[in-house]
């Protein structure tokens, strides 16, 4: 049973504002299907002895520290490059549709 149809990939591409070719749609539908099949394997793992963690603070109380990467300052992309990806802009700003009435 295919979970990721070409129509779903097209819908995701539409929401992401991606223009995909038919070959890319076919490729991504297969790749996403493989990812979901792998995720289904997790349903068969016995987790009965693992206590649920719904909050990261619980990890700290159990003396388990999550991994954080080192914060290294980097130069950001120039404003012109970033604005080139915008579907709509005014001067040096992104223009977005009004979302609040």
Image: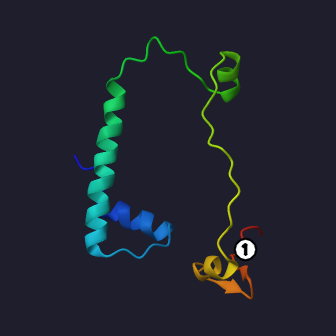
Q: Which residue is mark 1?
A: 98
| Mark 1 element type | loop
Residue 89: percent from the left, percent from the top? 68, 84
Q: Quadrant of the C terminus?
A: bottom right
Residue 80: percent from the left, percent from the top? 66, 82
Q: Is residue 59 above or below residue 35?
A: above
Q: Nearer the viewer, residue 14 or 21?
A: 21
Residue 14: percent from the left, percent from the top? 46, 70
Q: Nearer the viewer, residue 32 or 77?
A: 77
In terms of image quadrants, where is residue 94? bottom right
62 sits left or right of 23 in the view = right
Can see residue 47?
A: yes
At 67% from the left edge and 77% from the top edge, which residue is drawn? 78
At 55% from the left edge and 20% from the top edge, which residue is drawn? 52
At 33% from the left edge and 46% from the top edge, which residue is drawn? 35
Extreme residue toward the left, this view: 1
Q: Nearer the viewer, residue 7 or 57?
A: 57
93 sits left or right of 28 in the view = right
In terms of image quadrants, where is residue 25? bottom left
95 sits left or right of 50 in the view = right
In terms of image quadrants, where is residue 7? bottom left
Count of labels shown? 1
At 36% from the left edge and 74% from the top edge, which residue is drawn? 20
Can see residue 3?
A: no
Crowding at mark 1 (Cα within 10 Å: few <14, some 14-19, many 20+): few
Q: Is residue 16 above or below residue 68?
A: below
73 sits left or right of 28 in the view = right
Q: Is residue 11 above or below residue 65?
A: below
Q: Is residue 84 above or below residue 75?
A: below
Residue 64: percent from the left, percent from the top? 62, 21
């Amino acid at each position: 049973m295919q979970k990721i149809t070409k129509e779903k990939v097209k819908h995701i591409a539409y929401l992401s504002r991606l223009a995909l070719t038919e070959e890319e749609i076919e490729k991504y539908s297969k790749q996403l299907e493989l990812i979901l099949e792998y995720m289904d394997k997790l349903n068969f793992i016995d987790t009965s002895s693992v206590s649920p963690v719904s909050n990261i603070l619980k990890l700290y109380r159990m003396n388990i520290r999550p991994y954080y990467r080192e914060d290294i300052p980097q130069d950001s992309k120039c404003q012109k490059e970033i604005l080139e990806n915008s579907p709509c802009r005014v001067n040096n700003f992104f223009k977005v549709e009004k979302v609040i009435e």
